[in-house]
Structures are given as structure tokens and as C-alpha cells.
Amino acid sequence: MIFHYNYQINIKRLISLTDYKKLNILDFGCGKGLWPNKIKTIKKINKIILYDNEPSLFPLLKQKYNSKKFQVNFDLNKILKNKEYNVIVFSSVIQYIPHVNFKKLLQKLTKNKKTLIVVSDVPFLPKFIEFLLLPFFNIKRFFFVVTLIFSKKYKSMNYFTYDKKYFSYLKKRYNIKYISNLHDLNKLRYAVILRPKNN
């Protein structure tokens, strides 16, 4: 798995998905940050841009990632203008983005630019059904979710599932590959690799 349960990223597996000589990664919806600081010793990774729409996370991330390889940037307009990335990672965030918004977002992020897109932890079951099944597939994540469901913020969050058919509109621009989830929940969620076509 690329994404272990302790929220550390398996860098070797992530690199194996790409054929770029140097990786400039945009972590869209980075949350509190999943990247181990040891990444600064990996020469193939040139830069990781951390973006989230929750302003309160900014000082935490700036303190956590003070290496030159990390760029904490919550200015989406600036990110879209510069497009200093060739890989976009959506790590356990797509479920909070409405379908129409995700489509528009991809168009903005990839306009005039060929970019490998990795979407991990994609839910296809309704939230309640997934929660009922969790103890049978991953007891650790079940208890983790239990700690969240009682929070006001979690209850008020919109939640969206993504059937695999949803991504079919991208087949003209991307080679689409569905794989087992890159997070720990292999049976209840999946991952999508969108590799840009050469033509």
C-alpha cells in the first residue's frame, strides 16, 4: 500500500507509478500532512506542494515541513497560475468534493498541462453501509472513524461516493487504471490512476 494506516506514505511505491525523472507533487487536500520528513533525502522528488482549504492547518504545516522540498501554499489561484507540478495526489479527500466540482477542479489543475493523477481511498458505498462493514474489514479504521462521528464538523460534512463509471468521461485524455486502494481499506474503497495520453 502507498498509504499506510499511520498516514506515512510509501515513497518507493508512489515513485513506481511515475516515469518522470523529477517529481513535483501537488498534494491537494493535504490535511495535517502525510509525508515523512525523510523525503528530503530522496533526489527524485524535487518538490511537494501542500494545499488545503482549511486555513487553520497552515501554521501547523509550516512548522512541520520546514525543508525546501516542501511548499505550503493555500493560494489556489497562485497554484493554478504557476502549475509547478507533474503529479497530483488526492489522498482520502475526494469523498468531500461534489462530482461537478471535482470535474471542474481537474479541468483547472490540468489545463494546458499533462499531469499524472493519483486518487486514493475512493468510496463507492454509502457512508452508513461502509461504516457497518468496517469492523469486518479493518477494525483499526473502524475505531478511528468512531472517534470522528461524534464531532460536529464530521456530522455537518457532505459526503460523496464515486462509482468507477464516473471517471469514464476522462478516457479521451487519460489511460485510466483502477487498482486496489492505496490506503488500508482495500475491499471497501479503491484507487484510480489517471495517466495522460501522449496524443
Image: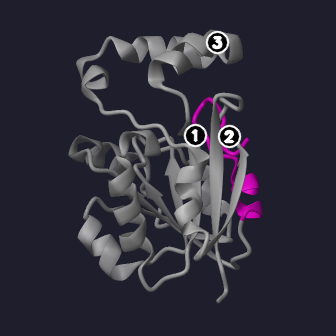
Where is residue 2? Give x, y as percent: 69, 45
Question: First in sequence: mark 1 or mark 3?
Answer: 1
Mark 3 Cα-neighbour bin, 10 Å: few <14, some 14–19, many ≥20: few
Where is residue 178? Give x, y as percent: 70, 51
Q: Residue at x 52, y 17 (%)?
A: 129
The residues bearing labels 1 and 2 have C-alpha atoms spaced at a distance of 6 Å
- Tell me where residue 141 sits by quadrant: top right
- Tell me where residue 12 sits by quadrant: bottom right
- The answer to whether one can see residue 182 in this image is yes
Q: As shown in the figure, which amino acid type bears the numbered disc 3?
A: Ile
Residue 181, disc:
2
Mark 1 Cα-neighbour bin, 10 Å: few <14, some 14–19, many ≥20: many
Region of the chain picked out in magenta, as a range = 1-17
Q: Label 1 belongs to which residue?
A: 121
- Residue 178 lies left or right of residue 174; in this view the side is right
Give the SS element for disc 2.
loop
Q: Label 3 belongs to which residue?
A: 139
Where is residue 71? Give x, y as percent: 40, 64
Q: As shown in the figure, which amino acid type bears the numbered disc 1?
A: Asp
- The answer to whether one can see residue 51 in this image is no
Where is residue 183? Give x, y as percent: 64, 37
Q: Please, is residue 125 above or below residue 77 in the view?
A: above
Question: First in sequence: mark 1 or mark 2?
Answer: 1
| Dominant SS type (magenta) | loop
